[in-house]
Image (cartoon, grey):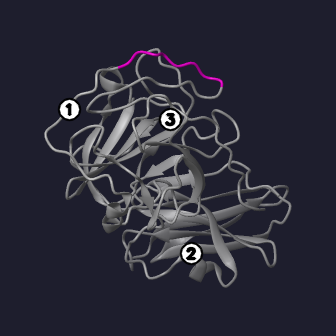
């Protein structure tokens, strides 16, 4: 099994808490063209994308996932906003995990469709005037006022917008500094590198930051690299790794809470046509490793930590 193919399914979008704009249609989806007046605010912010390096933002998706972003596919975009997709079909990304690009406090968690066409929106305040926006979410898993860590799940990819505004599932992502819209929209920086505007495919290095002393590579062993992952709420992350030298996959669930205390944790791997292999029990730091030869085969993988679980479909075929 190899890395899932990445094809942009479409980049429809709208804009802004301070004000919105027109949504361009996504692939196979219609969008209403009703501009929303753009508001203004008191202060402006510098537009130097390099400044954002101080906040050490990461891609808003789980570790190892590759997503294609586009800033020019929507007529609604004002400057450096990005629409993200990774699936090969319009609905392929619906329900995929969205995580916090950096630690902070949830400033907004609400459906903003009638206000600005953002649909389900989470805004995180990172301090120093920096904030990030995650729009069109299918679900929101954090509430306003909550403190979130980098890599913590905050929602899932969706296609929510204003009533009657049909768009394909994708994540609309923004970084802002200050409050003078739209000049406060900044270039996005992921893992220390400015996004390759107007479009680029980026692999997530948003691998948590908890005090767990073990990494997925250490658990699975030499030669294994993370190719996919899924957040298990705030309790942990389940990782899928691949070893190109021997064609083996490995799955491990790394805990982020109750570290050093044995709690129920599970990791499993199922190669298509074969029996599922599971490691389940009370573990202090991680479940797994679960390994299997999967070259040329599709796999199901997943795990559980705390009350959260993840179960993939058969994927990563090849």
Q: Earlier in the sequence, mark 3 or mark 1?
A: 1
For the stretch drawn in magenta, the main secondary structure is: loop
In the orientation shown, which residue stands out farthest toward the left? 42
10 Å crowding of disc 2: few (<14), some (14-19), many (20+) = many
Give residue 120's mark: none
Q: Quadrant of residue 39?
A: top left
Q: Which residue is mark 1?
A: 40
Q: 132 or 254: which is nearer to us?
A: 132
Q: 252 or 93: which is nearer to us?
A: 93
Numbered disc 1: secondary structure: loop
**x 41%, y 69%: residue:** 256
10 Å crowding of disc 3: few (<14), some (14-19), many (20+) = many
Numbered disc 3: secondary structure: loop
Q: Position of residue 197 (x, y in %)?
A: 52, 50
Is there a contact, CB below 8 Å, between mark 3 and mark 1? no
Q: Which residues fall within the magenta stretch?
A: 28-35
Q: 175 or 120: which is nearer to us?
A: 175
The quadrant in which the C terminus is found is bottom right
Q: Position of residue 67 (x, y in %)?
A: 58, 51
| 22 versus 248 height, above or below | above
Give the Cα distance between marks 2 and 1: 46 Å
Q: Which residue is mark 3?
A: 158
Q: Which residue is mark 2?
A: 216
């Amino acid at each position: 099994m190899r890395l899932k193919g990445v094809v942009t399914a479409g980049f429809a979008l709208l804009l802004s808490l301070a004000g919105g704009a027109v949504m361009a249609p996504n692939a196979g989806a219609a969008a209403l063209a009703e501009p929303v007046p753009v508001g203004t605010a008191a202060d402006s912010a510098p537009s130097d994308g390099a400044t954002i390096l101080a906040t050490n933002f990461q891609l808003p998706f789980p570790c190892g996932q590759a997503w294609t972003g586009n800033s020019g596919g929507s007529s609604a975009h004002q400057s450096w906003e990005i629409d993200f997709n990774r699936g090969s079909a319009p609905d392929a990304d619906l329900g995929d995990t969205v995580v916090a690009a950096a630690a902070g406090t949830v400033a907004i968690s609400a459906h903003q469709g009638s206000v600005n066409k953002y649909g389900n929106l989470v805004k995180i305040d990172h301090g120093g005037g920096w904030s990030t926006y995650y729009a069109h979410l299918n679900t929101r898993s954090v509430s306003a006022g909550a403190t979130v860590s980098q890599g913590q799940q905050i929602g899932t990819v969706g296609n929510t917008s204003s009533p009657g505004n049909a768009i394909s599932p994708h994540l609309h992502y923004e970084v802002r500094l200050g409050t003078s819209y739209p000049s406060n929209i900044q270039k996005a920086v992921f893992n220390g590198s400015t996004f390759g505007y107007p479009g680029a495919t980026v692999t997530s290095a948003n691998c948590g930051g908890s005090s767990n002393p073990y990494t997925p590579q250490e658990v699975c062993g030499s030669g294994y690299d993370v190719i996919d992952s899924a957040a298990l709420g705030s309790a942990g992350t389940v990782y899928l790794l691949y070893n190109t030298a021997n064609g083996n996959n490995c799955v491990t669930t790394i805990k982020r809470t109750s570290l050093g205390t044995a709690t129920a944790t599970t990791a499993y791997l199922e190669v298509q046509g074969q029996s599922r292999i599971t490691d389940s029990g009370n573990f202090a730091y991680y479940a797994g490793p679960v390994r299997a030869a999967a070259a040329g085969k599709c796999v199901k993988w997943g795990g559980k930590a705390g009350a959260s679980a993840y179960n993939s479909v058969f994927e990563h075929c090849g």
